[in-house]
Amino acid sequence: MEGLQRCFVLHTRPYSETSLILDVFSEDNGRLTILSKGARRKRSNLKGTLQPFTPLFMKWSGRGSMRTLNHAEPISIGLPMRGYILYSALYINELVARVLENDTPYPVLFLDYLNVLRELAQADNPEPALRRFELALLHHLGYGIDFLHCAGSGLPVEDTMTYNYREQKGFIASMITGQLTFTGSQLKAIAARHFETPDQLKAAKRFTRMALKPYLGGKPLKSRELFIPRGRSTQK
């Protein structure tokens, strides 16, 4: 069928008695809001199809802030997500839905999204995949930063030296330590998106949390509440 596009449903919500509003991440158009008429009817052929983490071919019509779904079919079965891995995947979906503007193409980020879902579906520890996707998202949003050179001297970062992050400038060598301080070893790991130690993973999480904050605003991510077991905070 002409006009089909690879897509993932990020989130659904009821609309009227029989329809659904879909938040969709598409390969060529980016994030879209699409109305699926009659999708909640008992005899709808879309029942069970419009689910997160299921690769879909979709086609829609209309213009403006909400399109109308014309066709949807699964490309393959949904990627298996359970327990802690499911919470991580829901976090990725909410991040994409919150940060990306509607109707802005991100074809390479779409592939990064597909890759992170595949990684999560096979992962015992989701943290490396989450950090890699966050860094990819920041890159596609135009968040350019040099992790490998001191912004003050221009010299390559050294593993054992400490560097303080300064917004819009980069990392500057400093003996003062705090939440904005990273070692050269940590910065190299973030630049390579390859994390060999828990310390490097924690540093990457600290950086991405800080860098994503301006894009998310003051409203907390609902998916992070899923990571709070028995009153103890272990946020993504």
Image (cartoon, grey):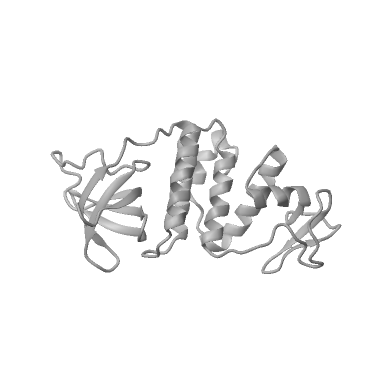
The furthest residue to the right = 175
Q: Is residue 156 left or right of residue 193?
A: right
Instruction: State whether residue 73 is above or below residue 107.
Output: above
Q: Position of residue 228 (x, y in %)?
A: 55, 39
User: Which residue appears at 31% of the width and 49% of the height?
Assistant: 12
Q: Nearer the viewer, residue 10 or 16?
A: 10
Q: Quadrant of the C terminus?
A: top right
Q: Position of residue 113 (x, y in %)?
A: 45, 48
| Image label count | 0
Q: Position of residue 186 (x, y in %)?
A: 73, 48
Instruction: State whether residue 217 is above or below residue 18.
Output: below
User: Which residue appears at 86% of the width and 57% of the height?
Assistant: 175
Whether residue 217 is visible, yes or no, is: no
Q: Is residue 77 left or right of residue 100?
A: left
Q: Quadrant of residue 212?
A: bottom right
The furthest residue to the front = 2
Q: Is residue 197 left or right of residue 143?
A: right
Q: Nearer the viewer, residue 222 or 165?
A: 165
Instruction: State whether residue 63 is above or below residue 212.
Output: below
Whether residue 96 is visible, yes or no, is: yes
Instruction: State whether residue 47 is above or below residue 30.
Output: above
Q: Quadrant of residue 157?
A: bottom right
Q: Position of residue 143 (x, y in %)?
A: 58, 63
